[in-house]
Amino acid sequence: MSWVVPGGGRRVPALSDPDGPPMPSEASLVDICQYLKDIQDGEAAEDFAKAIEAANKLIRRFPQETLAYKSKLVLLIRLNQWEDAFSMINKCPGKKLGDCHFEKAYVLYRLGKLDESLTALEPLPKDDVRVKELKAQIFYKQDKFKESCDILQWMVKNHTDESDEERLANFQAVQQMIEAEKKQAEASSSEMDVDSGEKMLTRKEEKYLKKREARNANPKKEGEIAKLKRRQRKRKILPKNYDPNVPPDPERWLPKHERTAYRKKNKKTRDREIGRGTQGSASANPNV
């Protein structure tokens, strides 16, 4: 994932500092300006080794020149010489380097000391764009994608500069990481459910095996097993008024009207068929 160097990271800060300490003397002004010009020319040509050599000469001749120390520190950062830059920050007094909280935080970030980098950013204003962007990078390295996404979202909406495209790409990359985390969490939860189901099955199996082992450990006698089998048989249900001495009726499987003992209850319905039929039909009896 490509990150934007905080503050652009493409230029050494302006080498004219009106609020800095005064020049040592008017006689040395020409030499100091020449050294500063060499630093600027080296930085413009991306010949950072030449620019650092000029900064070292300026520091040796004019140790009180604050701008020389700060320029050398920025050039070391541009050359990715993080250990040298960190050593310079620790060795040089604060008066010579001036305010370098952000540079120190950035060097610590590149050295992988993320918690110390966040601590170094605390004295700086929270609304500073450089601070916000560096915090987004630190949170991303710490897998705190939600915090990084919130900062980058604010930057995309409320700030614009030459790094807008890279910042937008970083914001989209963080969003993808958040979505990947959600999918991974859902997959892990489903796996946990499957594991719990398997554990329940194994518990049932263990319970069954324990019962079977207990049964095998205490075998019952043959007489007891026969008694248990007799108890398990269902009791036969006999009809009411059953007499075991009387043989069953052989016609019990025939319908009632086909049995020999069956008699119709009413015979008067035989004459009711006379006169029935369709209207106007002739009588079938020739004597009528």
Image (cartoon, helix red, strand yellow):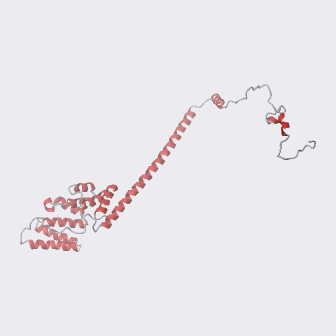
- Indicate left or right for 39 with 177 as reference: left
154 or 145, which is in the foreground? 154
**Position of residue 279 measured from the top left corner of the image (x, y, whole percent):** 82, 46
Q: Quadrant of residue 286?
A: top right
Is 31 placed above or below 261 here?
below
**Residue 49 at what x, y percent from top left?**
21, 71
Q: Is residue 256 above or below residue 58?
A: above
Front residue of 127/232: it is 127
> Residue at the spot x=36%, y=62% of the render?
172
Residue 232, by quadrant, is top right
Percent of width and height locating residue 167 = 31, 64
Residue nearest the viewer, comparing 7 with 50: 7
Whether residue 32 is visible here, answered yes or no, is yes
Residue found 26% across the figure and 59% down from its top: 132
As drawn, 282 above or below 173 = above
Q: Is residue 96 left or right of residue 203?
A: left
Quarter of the figure with the N terminus: bottom left
Which residue occupies 50% across, 42% down?
Answer: 200
